[in-house]
Image: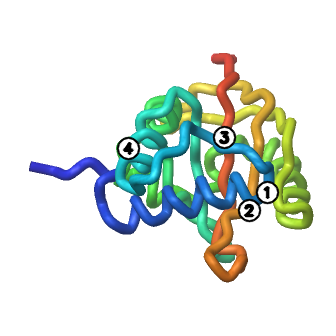
Amino acid sequence: MKISPWNEPPIVEWSRLLLDSYRHWTGKHLIEHTPSAKQQARMLFEASIIVVSHGVEQDPILNYGNQTALDLWELSWDQFIKTPSRLTAEADDRAEREKMLERAKLNGYFDGYRGVRISSTGRRFLVERALIWTVIDLAETPIGQAATFSRWSNLS
């Protein structure tokens, strides 16, 4: 029997870093806070909002997507975590996406991003009011970037 991705120790830890980093930059909790890291990981994975992240590679690869994100991008967990982050946007929107990611890097986070994304099947959707933040470790070293949003509409 396959264990849910949120239950894997590295994902439990990454989920904690996502949530702690979000709180570090915004002063708010992304989801309801509980003292159990495993329970937090499950709540994040099952949240109705979109939560995605990538690492700090030269061409960043997605390393987390909650179930709502997997459904929106029409990918399995295993497919999602092998996808270059840039491929979640259409080619025409990638320059604007890069500018937004740079702004989030400089300031810790960027709130209010709006842009078109594309699913694995080519379905286009408009993301509105996304918040992007820098994921940091305990030493406050940047180790990735994450995004969350709860508003999107299908375009095709």
Say which amino acid is labelled 2.
Thr
Q: Amino acid at mark 3?
A: Thr
Label placed on residue 148: 3
Q: Please tell me whether mark 1 sits on a helix, a strand or a loop.
A: helix
Residue 42: percent from left, percent from top: 38, 44
Tell me the distance, in whole angstroms, between the alpha carbons under discs 4 and 2. Answer: 21 Å
Mark toward the start of the polypeptide (3 vs 2)? 2
Does residue 32 appear anywhere in the picture?
Answer: yes
Camera-nearest residue between 73 and 15:
15
State which tag comes first along the sequence, 3 or 4.
4
Mark number displayed over residue 25: 1
- Which residue is identified by label 2? 134
Q: Report how far apart the C-alphas of labels 3 and 4 lie in the structure.
A: 16 Å
Examine the image and state in which quarter residue 139 appears. Answer: bottom right
Q: Label 1 vs label 4: CA separation?
A: 22 Å
Image depth: mark 2 or mark 1 in front: 1
Q: Nearer the viewer, mark 4 or mark 2?
A: 4
Three-letter amino acid code of the residue under disc 1: Trp
Instruction: State yes or no: discs 2 and 1 in contact (Cβ < 8 Å).
Output: yes
Q: Are marks 3 and 2 in contact (CB under 8 Å)?
A: no
Q: Is residue 143 above or below residue 4?
A: below
Q: Which residue is mark 4?
A: 42
- Mark with earlier residue (4, 2): 4
Q: Which amino acid, by three-letter code, is at mark 4?
A: Arg
Q: Crowding near pointer 3: few (<14 within 10 Å), some, many (20+)? A: many
Q: Quadrant of residue 127?
A: top right
Name the side, left or right, on which 70 lies relative to 56: left
